[in-house]
Amino acid sequence: MAAHSSAGLLDYVFPTIVSEYYNQAPTKEGYRFASEEPNGSKREEMGVIMNPGTPDEQLVVMGMYSSYDEKTDTETVTMYTADKDGYKARYQIKNRKLSPGALKSAAG
């Protein structure tokens, strides 16, 4: 997820950084970054300045992060938005295996 656009002053505030597990880049409207850990955990975020130069100017941040638990084979994903109205998050749990007891009970 590489965003390579010139953003003037933001180039100095948020320099473009790319490594094996981390990518950060300024954009004309704000910033974007992503990171991924070797264990499968991820984070992506985008910040956008809305109504720049006006009394209604605000930073809106949208993103997601996930973590993986190898023991339970469960990935938890959180999607979020933060703006003038606060922080709002939605959660999702994926790849959840049923225990042998639950499978036996469901089979009758």
Image (spheres, rainbow, N blue to C red):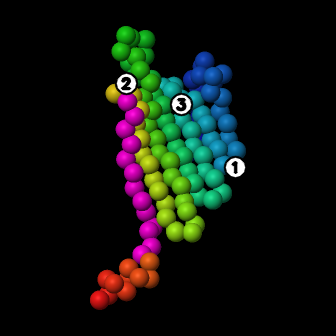
Circle nearer the viewer, 2 or 3: 2
In the depicted view, which residue is nearer to us: 85 or 54? 85
The amino acid at mark 1 is Glu
Residue at 37% x, 10% y is: 55
Identify the mark at residue 20; answer none if there is no mark.
1
Where is residue 81? Give x, y as percent.
Answer: 40, 37
Say which quarter of the image contains residue 94.
bottom left
Identify the mark at residue 31; answer none if there is no mark.
3
Q: Is residue 58 above or below residue 5?
A: above
Q: Is residue 83 above or below residue 88?
A: above
**Residue that carries the numbered disc 2 in the rendered image:** 84
Asked which secondary structure carries label 1, the reply is loop
**Are the residues at dot 1 and dot 2 in contact (C-beta closer than 8 Å)?**
no
Magenta region, residue range: 86-98
Instruction: Please check the rendered image and state whether residue 84 is part of the magenta-colored stretch, yes or no.
Output: no
Comes first in the chain, label 3 or label 1 = 1
Placement of the C terminus among the 4 image quadrants: bottom left
